[in-house]
Image (cartoon, grey):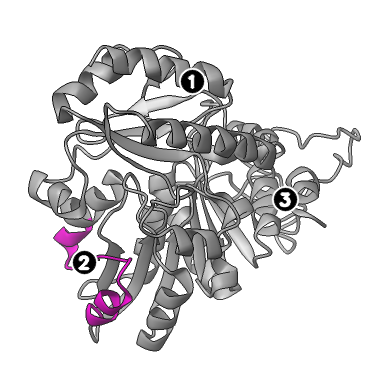
Amino acid sequence: MGFRTKQIHAGVTPDPLTGSILTPIYQTTTYVQDSVDEYLAKGFSYSRSGNPTVRALELKMTGLEDATDSICFGTGMAAVQAVMLAFLNAGDHAIISDVAYGGTYRLCTKILSRFGVEFTFVDGSNLDEVAAAVRDNTKLFLTETPANPTMKCTDIAGASKIARAAGAVHAVDNTFLTPYYQRPLELDADMSIYSTTKYMDGHNATVGGAVVCATQEQADEVRFIQGSTGSIMSPQVAWLTLQGCKTMSLRLDAQSANAMAIAEYLESHDKVEQVCYPGLKSFAQHELASTQASGYGAMLWFEVKGGLVAGKKLMDNIDVFSLAENLGSVESLITHPVTMTHAAVEEAERIRVGIIDGLVRVSVGLEDAEDLIEALDKALELV
């Protein structure tokens, strides 16, 4: 089946009891067993470790990436945490993209580091630096590409080759591009990680996460963490995400077209210092972005001349765009990462990796491009 067909049909069958075309919301705690000897014959015992609605979404995620299995979580950060807990022990070392979501950075530096896990944050755009960071105790590579919020890209196949040679697993946070535009497992990564909150849902309605695995052994490791920590996605969220997934490719194509139009507009504006969008030929890694993915996505950032003060003024006075922390929704959102999504990252580290004070991150939605550009134009007149 093609991707759009799988968006609608993968993992979903009519309800055998009623014929309902939509998977029911199994809002239940426990499942009655046929007998002691046939315990788990139906596959479910307690909703902390498995739920039929959640399982339908897991099967859909597996189908969308032609993977072996998937595990769904209560949040994207729960998914990231599960991967780290599954493959890292005290004394182990992990290589993480130096530009990553602030919650990932916080989990590594403020929590897991307390338990003897070592982390190196490496410039993923330079595979020589990635290879040089490998140690004898390196067990996990976690690559975020394109990275939040700078859009830095990593050669997934190249990083996977280094990880494989080191005997480590390679997980890719593919939230920005989804399996519609970028397929990490086909580039030899072991796992894809998603915040389903973003483009999978697409409507600012839920928070959730998923890990999509190339092998059953890896999936079993991650699922064990899910059950042990009680971090499974709720059935209501799974049901809503199942519906959101059905239109993901249509939304992404339209949002990405809007993003390109906005990026081109911003690049030509005399009050804009710089704009960063993988679809622009001026993007430093445009060739890599064009070869390892089939689309550029709907995320971009820019800096207004005048830096932080001018950027804040624009964000405080813009219409149509909402000042909010999420991304990937049908509504266009504008964010100041330094004070919002990446506030947990120390100033020196933010500066080192290019998260400048005046960076304005934009998640482009489904509004008319003309209205979005007009809103930006009016806001830029005020700075």
Q: Is residue 369 left or right of residue 345?
A: right
Three-letter amino acid code at the position of disc 3: Gln
Count numbered badges in the picture: 3
Instruction: Give 357 or 341, whichever is nearer the viewer.
Output: 357
Residue under label 1: 372
Please identify the quarter of the rendering in which residue 103 is found: top left
Mark earlier in primary sequence (3, 2)? 3
Q: Secondary structure at mark 2?
A: strand
Q: CA distance from mark 3 to mark 2?
A: 44 Å
Between circles 1 and 3, the one closer to the viewer is 1
Question: Residue 219 location in percent, x, y?
Answer: 55, 66
Q: Which mark is residue 331?
A: none
Q: CA distance from mark 1 to mark 3?
A: 55 Å
Q: Is residue 163 left or right of residue 117?
A: right
Disc 2 target residue: 119
Specify whether residue 219 is painted magenta.
Answer: no
The relative height of residue 132 versus residue 375 in the rendered view (above or below) is: below
Type of amino acid under label 1? Leu
The 10 Å Cα crowd at callout 3, few under 14, some 14 to 19, many 20 or more, is some
User: Where is residue 249 shown, x and y percent of the image?
Assistant: 67, 42
Query: Which part of the image, by quadrant, shows the C terminus?
Result: top left
First along the sequence among labels 1 and 2: 2
**Rendered location of residue 251, percent (x, y):** 64, 35
- Report if the CB atoms under discs 1 and 3 are less than 8 Å apart: no
Image point (53%, 75%), residue name: 188
- Mark yes or no: residue 224 visible: no
Which comes sooner in the sequence, label 1 or label 3?
Answer: 3
| Residue 123 x/y as whole percent | 26, 65
Instruction: Give me the residue at 46% from left, 69% from top.
Output: 156
Give the magenta range: 112-134
Residue type (three-letter) at the residue carrying disc 2: Phe
Residue identifier under label 3: 33
